[in-house]
Amino acid sequence: MALSSEFPVDLEAAILDLKRERNALILAHYYQEDPIQDLADVVGDSLALARAAQTADCELIVFCGVHFMAETAAILNPGRPVVVPDLDAGCSLADGCPADAFGEFVGQHPGAKVLTYINASAEVKAMSDLICTSSNAVKMVESMGDAPLIFAPDRHLARWVSKQTGREDLIVWPGACVVHEQFSARELARLKVRNPEADVLAHPECDQSVLDQADFVASTTGIIQRAVEFPERPSIVATEEGVFHSIRQQAPDKVLIPAPGADESCSCSLCPYMRLNTLEKLYLSLRDLGPEVSVDPVIAERARVPIERMLELS
Ligand code: 13P
Ligand code: SF4
């Protein structure tokens, strides 16, 4: 049965009407589909969105991203509802680091400090001394002093940060992102031969063999800024294709080439979790005020400390 009758013909206008009625703030990550980015009040990387959530002045936050991002917004906004278009929009990094197993891992390294990438559950954040994102990970590691340091849950980001900081002793939880891990170093090398003038931009969640071939490694915001800085030069982009929208808005003639995966037939650079969110689900979340992201208040109180510390240090 078609659901289309449930939706107004001008969905975008209906979303904006509901947004005003609810006094809502729509936050969207760069990996969201273009029409969602166009409707959002703030589009950003994980750090910018956490900041926007921290300073939110509204009655409702609608978070178009993945669950850990909305959870972070909820932790920073006790008492203010945070809803999402699709509660199933998870993340392979957060899902690959269950709180009970991580608690055991931390217990095996007494005396170690815990620095956790923001792509983790509220429970894991609550066990952490400090949180980081891809845009401030180097700075956060450097702020932690020389004590033994656990870095979770992305092993690729950990290796990259370790190279940048010279800290080769990081104790690493061996997680990975299903999207960034599938970019193929072999196919990328072939693509570079065919496009020798291209600037290769990569997210630090990529495997080292891909990062070794990159001209520039940064968060989504950093990748967008670099691409826009050189509008004449083609870019090969090793991150989720959602970033293309913002680049094209700022540099319409820019040639953008998605980094290849090993399997030519897949839409490898689309995050299957981020892409669960649609305009229809965004409309429903505003209309029905749900699904709401809830965090146990005790966990939220503990998790808020390392998140706020990160925001102060960044
Ligand atoms: P950014 O913080 O760089 O936007 O990264 C978020 C993310 O999930 C990357 O896969
Ligand atoms: Fe998680 Fe990877 Fe999707 Fe980012 S791209 S939300 S790290 S699964």
Image (tube, rainbow, N blue to C red):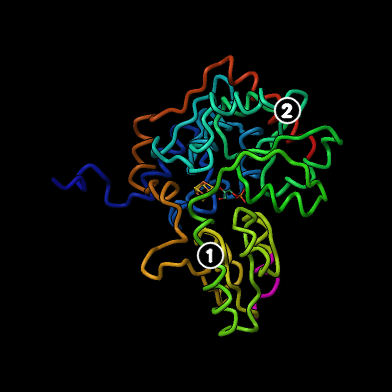
- Residue named by callout 1: 244
Extreme residue in the left direction: 1
Give the number of callouts: 2
The residue type indicated by label 2 comes to: Asp
- Callout 1 secondary element: helix
Which residue is depicted at the point 56% across and 77% down?
255
Quarter of the image with the C terminus is top right
Give the side of residue 298 with respect to residue 139, left or right.
left
Mark 1 touches mark 2? (CB < 8 Å) = no
- Local packing at callout 1 (Cα closer than 10 Å; few below 14, some 14-19, many 20+) is many
Give the spatial CA distance, label 1 vs label 2: 34 Å
Q: Amino acid at mark 1?
A: Phe
* 307 in relation to 39, above or below: above
Q: Residue at x 65, y 63 (%)?
A: 211
- Which residue is at 41% across, 67% downward? 263
Q: Residues within 10 Å of mark 2 (few under 14, many from 20)?
A: many
Percent coordinates x, y for residue 285 in the rendering: 38, 35
- Residue 92 image offset from top left, x and y in percent: 48, 43
Q: Look at the image and give the residue range highlighted in magenta.
A: 226-232
First in sequence: mark 1 vs mark 2? 2
Q: Residue furthest top?
A: 298
x and y percentages locating residue 250 in the rendered image? 61, 67
- Rendered image quadrant of residue 193: bottom right
Q: Quadrant of the N terminus?
A: top left
Q: Could you tell whether 91 is left or right of 211 in the image?
A: left
What is the number of the mark on residue 54?
none
Q: Is residue 143 above or below residue 264?
A: above
Secondary structure, mark 2, is: loop
Residue 232, position as x, y percentages in the image:
65, 80
Q: Which residue in the structure is indicated by mark 2?
A: 129
**Comparing labels 1 and 2, the label whose residue is closer to the camera:** 2
